[in-house]
Image: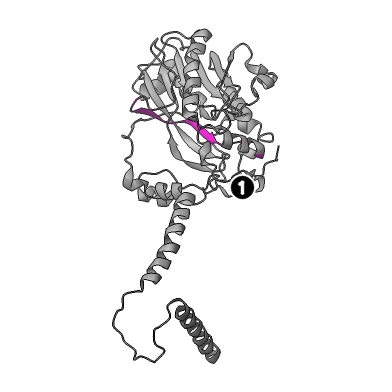
Amino acid sequence: MVQVTKIGKALIFLLVEYFFSKLFPLQSMAPRPLRLTYQRPPPRFLFIILLIIIPVSMVGIFTYGQKISYFFRPLWDNPPPPFKRLSHYYAENVSMDHLCRLHGWSVRSEPRQVYDAIIFSNELDILEIRWRELHSLVTKFVILESNTTFTGIPKPLFFASNQTRFAFAEGKIVHDVFSGRIAAHGSCEDPFALESKQRAAMNGLLRLAGISSGDILIMSDTDEIPSSHTVKLLQWCDGIPPVMHLEFRHYMYSFEFPVDYSSWRATAHVFHPRTLYRHSRQTDLILSDAGWHCSFCFRHIQEFVFKMTAYSHADRVKRRDFLDHSRIQNLICQGDDLFDMLPEEYTFQELFKKMGPIPSSCSAVHLPAYLIENADNYRFLLPGGCLRSPE
């Protein structure tokens, strides 16, 4: 075996020597003494190396530029200012008077009216879980959907064509359609600009719904669900901040894959005539552990494909095979990233900690009550239910 290895190495050496003799022919074939001194590589050799390295580097940057950028984000980007976290107290069978006092507030003699306002796309299952969770507390469910996606693609009016499913909330629903703009073929319109216009249209719909000064207004996406006890706290306590963000536990694909407590965009407002509907940072205050944010929590694979091409980050679909059904199914069950991206973190410590698949959890405790009561129908959102149907 040792003899064979030596012969193999000798053959490789001879082949390499032959290759270089063809590339860089010597002026004389006479044998020369072996020198150990450094010799400058021939210009032709350097040219060939550059000819290889430059195109490979260009292809690598083009293919993995986003990954490279995200990996070095701790070097080129600064984190936003930290939130001031408000402690959140809750336990079953504890009086509202006591809970308000624990937060440094006082209990009201009567509850405020609550308006829950969302921009809707296609998240029918999550919408039902959300509205069932909040139905007994909310005065009006204000929902605005568009006939186009944020990327300018025509889409069905999913809510309008499924209203019978939400008959339990009839009388509380204020629904309208935002007339979107279909993007011209090959155009590069900013999806965030289209999203901003739709959110601005929500201001008029809220006034049409009858909101008044002093009412509670919840601004969030459909999949950002405040817990009922959080809304009840805001409804019954005096002295709450006029604006505060709501911290939600973030889940991916289902409640089997908890990510962290990084979801902060949802807000609760004591409504004022100058209040404007937004989905960005509005204050430094955030109420801890106020609900759930379940991203890409769909029943069917085709719903994943729709959102991947429809929402404001559709540019993350770098290749056509990203939309392959079998690929998406595998990534859901692995808890891995649909867009093959690195975590968006500001420190290398957090970046390395969150790299790779999301660890699965067997816990289904402290989730929306309607989800647990109807577990058979929502098995795909619970531990062990990662398999999805195509349509």
Look at the picture and state if 183 lies above or below 144.
Answer: below
Judge whether residue 366 can be spotted in this image: no
The residue closer to the viewer here, 163 or 137, is: 163
* Quadrant in which residue 148 is drawn: top right
| Percent of width and height locating residue 127 | 59, 26
Q: How many numbered marks, from 0 up?
A: 1
Colour scheme of the picture: one colour
In the image, which residues are magenta? Answer: 283-301
- Any part of residue 54 in sight: yes
Seen in the image, is 317 located left or right of residue 343?
Answer: right
The location of residue 97, given as percent across then percent down, is 41, 18
Q: Give the side of residue 122 with respect to residue 191, left or right.
A: right
Q: Position of residue 353 (x, y in %)?
A: 42, 51
> Dot 1 surroundings within 10 Å: few (below 14), some, or many (20 or more)?
few
Q: Which residue is mark 1?
A: 321
**Left or right: 146, with 245 as reference point:** right
Residue furthest out toward the front: 27
Of residues 174 and 102, which is closer to you in this image? 174
**Quadrant, the C terminus:** top right
Within the magenta stretch, is there residue 285?
A: yes
**On screen, 15 above or below 205?**
below
Element at badge 1?
Answer: helix
Let me know if residue 100 is in the magenta part: no
Image coords of residue 81 (percent x, y): 31, 34
Tell me the amino acid under the disc marked 1: Asp
Q: Quadrant of residue 256?
A: top right
- Measuring 40% from the left and 66% from the top, which residue is drawn there? 47
Q: Residue furthest left?
A: 37
In the rendered view of the protein, which quadrant contains the N terminus?
bottom right
